[in-house]
Every structure is written in C-alpha cells, then in structure tokens.
C-alpha cells in the first residue's frame, strides 16, 4: 500500500526500442508518411495503454539532411514517437552486422555458415564498437527527454548496452530491460567475444525480464559462470547490489483482434476467402521471412504430408504469408531464394491447371486482412526453430472462437509453455513428425478441437499485452523502492 501511494496515477513511461511502432517513408523534401512496423515487439507494445508512454527509436530510414530530420521529428511527435537518427554506416555495422548477423542467430542457437562465421570474426570488433556507439546515441536522446520520476523501459538485444549508458548518466533513473528473444544457454553465450561487457551492461538495469523462466535461468547462470557473480532466487548480486531478474510472459491485445472480426470490411474479406477456398481445408503460416521461423522446414513437411496422403491433395491449401525483413543481411537474401525455389518445385509437382497447393506471399498484410485470414484458417502452422514467444500463435487463437481450428506449434517457441496444452507440439526439425501432425489436425474430432481451443483462448484473453506491461512496470517500481529502503537501513 505504501508503495502504491508513492506512484503517480499515470506514470510517464519512456519505451526505448530499436524499432519504432511506425516506419517512415519519404514523400518529399519535408514530407513523410508513416506505416505500421511489423514484428512481435511492436504488436505487444501497441497493447500498452495504462501509461503516459513516449516511444524512442529508429524510424527505419537514413535521413542525412536537417530539413528531413526536422519534418520527420514533427510527423512522429503526433504518434508520441521520438526518432533516433542513425547514419548508413552505423546501421550497416550495428543493425545489419552486430545485431542481426551476430546476436540474433546466436540467441536463437543458429550457427552461421563457415565462411560467414570467419568474415564475422574479422569484422567483430568494428561491429561491436558501432553497437556501443549506437546505444550511446539512443542514450543521448533518452537523456534529452527524461524527467525525474519517469520509468525507462529498454527493449531487446539491440540495446543491451543502454542500461549502463543511462545509469552512468544518472544513477537514479529507473531502468528496466526486457529481451524479446530467447536468452541461450550460458554455453552458447560464452562463445561471444563481448560476452562479459554485454552482461555487465544489462546488469546495470534495476529489473531484467524475459518471456520464460528458462531464459531467465540461462541469463542468471551466464552471470554466475562467466562473471563469477552470485545468483539468488531474486536475480544477480554484485557487491551488495541486486539486479532483479524474472520471467514476464508477453501477450497480445486480444480484444483488438476479437473486435475486428465484427468489422464489415473483415466480414467481407472472410466471405471472399471462404468462397475462394470452398471445399478445401485452409492451413496458414504468417511469419517474418526469417531463418528462425523454420519456413523451409514447414513447407517440406507439407510436401511430405501431400506425398503420404494422396486423398488430401486437392482438399488442402497452405497459405504462407512471409513479410520480408532485414533484407540487407545476406543470410536473409539466401533464405528468400531458398523458399521460392522449394515452393516452385512443390507447386510444380502437386499443382493442377486450376489449383496449386501452396500460395506464398512475400509481403505484409494489413490488420483487417490478417484477422480475416486467421478466422478462416483450419490449421495454423508455427514451426519456429527457436522463437522468444511467437505472437502469431496468440493472434490465431484470438480469431478462432467461431471456428476452433488447430494450432500446430513448435516446442522451441516460448509460446509452447503457455499454449502447449491446447496445441499439437512438434519438433520442427523432424518433418515426418510435422507431416503426421498435419494429418492428426485434419482428422481431429470436433470435441477435442473445442477442448484444446478453449484452453488456449482463455490464456490468450487473460494474459494480455496490457497485463504484461503493467506487471513489468509495477515490479520495476517496487524493485527500485525496495533497493532504496535497503540502502537506508
Ligand atoms: P517476431 O517477433 O519474430 O516477428 P511474432 O510472431 O512474435 O514474431 O510477431 C510477429 C508480428 O508481426 C505479429 O504481430 C504478426 O501479426 C506480424 N506479422 C508477421 N508477418 C506478417 C505479415 N506477413 N503481414 C502482417 N503482419 C505480419
Ligand atoms: C523481433 C525482434 C524485434 C524486431 C522485430 C522485427 O520481434 O525481437 O526487436 O523489431 O523482430 O525486426 P526488425 O529488424 O524489422 O525490427
């Protein structure tokens, strides 16, 4: 109660993430249009409503000139967003290089091909220097906007150095850091040349959060094994200072999806899709075109299913919607051509003059089109090789209260821990197992579908993004107050 009274009713929250919820597209010297960014981080953060939130991040474009920067700052201010301007070289070394070619695959347990690994080893130092420089640039913008009492909530692997930059500037700033990816086993983290510096920087935060208990446990054991610090049930202790570490499983704004299903435009889309795919069961994959999503494995499993179940060949269709992402990173370019090649081969093998088994779209869908697709789907296929949580699985469940379709879910997605009892869990590396689970889903009796769906729907509608954000910020406030009380004693 004492803790509650000290909090302002609507606390100012500075949300800092590499990616702003909107990305900018230049239309003229001083004119910009803004469109929604894709990705789980943005989806979850849009669900935060309780706070007076400001967003600080990169708008996804290079803006070298002052006129452009001023105009974009004005346009973003209307969305409560504050830009961090990063030049091309920094983006190349920090975002494409250190973040997405080193940390991202490492945190998802994916090895780089040998020649890329050698090239990465050579460029490591300059990329890490750019990473620190970029984090300092974010810190400068935060410092400019920070007011006493604000909570600063830093997100994801792009900004592991930021908690330290902020605390160096002002040790009183309340800093939380949340990771949206898995945190790997300490044996994996140990291979990173900058392993200790990154851990120490994160530990400068007051509260460190992960999607699952396992990720939190891996982080604590990396701190004990690599830094020799003490792990306690509350977190990590260093010379009497405690950094609280805990699991805060994320959710979605489920009401937004459920409400959308009643919008006439969505109803119209649903009608069109039902007519278009009449007589066929619809299977759906929605992913960023990323190697962690296991898209080639998913498509190969579907091929295996078609091979082994000839009677289903003209009765199912797989819609794979894959929005291109991080297109300047070579690994992502290779993935795009690999997926196209596999889809082309399978459609050639099983297609007819009037129908193909796989519809593959390399693009983003707008929110209403996405909701309609989720609603008409019979089976959703989420086959991530590793995934922090995976919100697509939550979105599918939220839109399925009428249909009660089946979710096939990778055991390597964080969501397996929350939706595992309602989904069919699979090892995405085992395409025979995934193919068999497709057959199981197609033949599942309606009572079983009903039971599984109810379990998942209850979870998705009670553990929302809003609840996640409130729990994290409240824990951060409490952690800081407790630390102050401890130092006074
Ligand atoms: P990640 O965070 O790795 O991108 P998630 O599954 O947690 O994975 O979140 C992905 C988010 O991006 C979801 O909100 C999903 O709706 C959105 N998304 C993914 N692919 C598309 C697409 N092709 N069109 C529109 N939105 C997409
Ligand atoms: C994941 C990451 C986010 C990132 C998103 C999209 O969800 O955890 O931090 O924003 O992917 O990737 P991008 O590189 O386009 O921001």
Image (cartoon, helix red, strand yellow):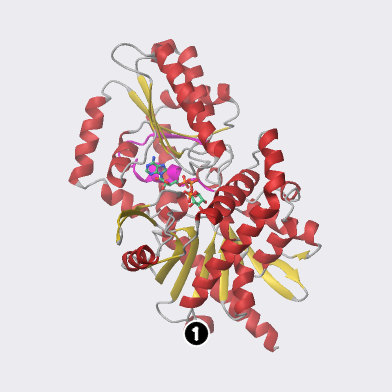
Q: Could you tell me which quadrant the C terminus lies in? A: bottom right
Query: Quadrant of the rendered structure where residue 374 is?
Result: top left
| Residue shown at the point (44%, 39%) measured from the top left | 324
In the image, is residue 137 above or below residue 94?
Answer: below
Q: In this view, does 226 lie to the left or right of 316?
A: right
Q: Can residue 322 be seen in this view?
A: yes
Image coordinates for residue 327, horizontal then vertical, percent: 48, 41
With respect to residue 384, does 337 lie above or below? above
Q: In which quarter of the image is residue 313?
A: top left
Q: Which residue lies furthest to the bottom in this view?
A: 488
Identify the residue at image location x=79%, y=65%. Answer: 229
Circle 1 packing at 10 Å, graded few (<14), some (14-19), many (20+), is: few
Total number of numbered discs in the rendering: 1
Question: Regarding ligand 1, which quadrant of the image does it lie in?
Answer: top left
Which is nearer the eye, 258 or 370?
Answer: 370
Give coordinates of residue 441: x percent, y percent. 44, 27
Is 397 colored magenta in this rendering? yes
Beta carbon at label 1 within 8 Å of ligand 2: no
Examine the rendering and report whether any part of residue 464 can be seen.
no
Closer to the camera in the image, 308 or 128: 128
Q: Which residue is drawn at 30% across and 11% down?
A: 353
Q: Mark 1 = which residue?
A: 6
Q: Residue placed at 70% from the left, 54% from the top?
A: 125
Find numbered disc 1 in the image and state the secondary structure of the residue it sits on.
loop
Q: Which of 247 and 112 is in front in this view?
A: 112
Q: Specify the segment rendered in magenta.
A: 389-409
- Residue 391: % across, % down: 45, 47
Q: In this view, does 101 lie to the left or right of 315?
A: right
Q: Looking at the picture, does residue 99 appear above or below residue 336?
A: below
User: In this rendering, is residue 457 above or below 486?
Assistant: above
Q: Would residue 100 be counted in the magenta stretch?
A: no
């Amino acid at each position: 109660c004492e803790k509650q009274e000290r909090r302002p009713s609507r606390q100012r929250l500075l949300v800092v993430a590499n990616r702003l919820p909107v990305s900018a597209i230049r239309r003229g010297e001083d004119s910009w249009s803004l469109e929604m960014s894709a990705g789980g981080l943005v989806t979850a953060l849009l669900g935060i409503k309780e706070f007076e939130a400001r967003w600080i991040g990169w708008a996804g474009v290079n803006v070298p000139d002052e006129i452009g920067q001023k105009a974009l700052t004005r346009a973003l201010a209307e969305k409560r967003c504050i830009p961090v301007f990063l030049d091309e070289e920094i983006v190349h070394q920090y975002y494409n290089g250190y973040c997405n070619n080193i940390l991202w695959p490492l945190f998802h347990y994916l090895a780089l091909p040998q020649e890329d690994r050698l090239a990465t080893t050579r460029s490591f130092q300059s990329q890490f220097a750019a990473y620190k420089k970029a984090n300092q640039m974010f810190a400068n913008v935060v410092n400019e906007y920070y007011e006493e009492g604000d909570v600063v909530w830093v997100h994801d692997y792009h900004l592991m150095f930021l908690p330290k930059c902020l605390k160096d500037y002002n040790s009183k700033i309340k800093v939380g850091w949340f990771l949206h990816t898995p945190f790997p086993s300490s044996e994996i983290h140990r291979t990173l040349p900058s392993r200790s510096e990154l851990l120490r920087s994160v530990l400068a935060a007051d509260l460190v959060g992960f999607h699952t208990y396992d990720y939190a446990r891996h982080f604590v054991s990396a701190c004990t094994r690599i830094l020799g610090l003490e792990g306690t049930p509350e977190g990590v202790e260093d010379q009497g200072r405690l950094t609280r570490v805990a699991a805060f499983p994320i959710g979605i704004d489920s009401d937004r999806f459920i409400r959308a299903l009643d919008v006439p435009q969505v109803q119209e889309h649903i009608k069109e899709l039902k007519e278009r795919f009449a007589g066929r069961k619809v299977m759906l994959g929605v992913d960023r075109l990323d190697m962690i999503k296991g898209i080639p494995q998913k498509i190969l499993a579907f091929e295996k299913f078609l091979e082994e179940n000839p009677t289903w060949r003209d009765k199912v269709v797989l819609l794979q919607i894959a929005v291109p992402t991080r297109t300047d990173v070579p690994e992502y370019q290779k993935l795009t051509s690999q997926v196209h090649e596999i889809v082309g081969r399978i459609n050639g093998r099983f297609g007819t003059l009037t129908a193909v088994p796989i519809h593959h779209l390399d693009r983003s869908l707008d929110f209403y089109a996405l909701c309609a697709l989720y609603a008409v789907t019979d089976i959703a296929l989420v086959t991530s090789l590793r995934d922090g949580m995976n919100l697509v699985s939550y979105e599918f469940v939220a839109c399925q209260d009428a249909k009660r379709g089946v979710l096939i879910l990778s055991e390597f997605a964080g969501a397996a821990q929350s939706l595992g009892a309602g989904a069919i869990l699979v090892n995405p590396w085992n395409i025979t197992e995934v193919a068999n689970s497709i057959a199981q889903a197609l033949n599942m009796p309606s009572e079983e579908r009903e039971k599984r769906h109810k379990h998942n729907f209850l979870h998705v509608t009670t553990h929302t993004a809003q609840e996640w954000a409130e729990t994290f910020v409240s824990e951060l406030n409490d952690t800081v107050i407790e630390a102050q009380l401890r130092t006074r004693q």
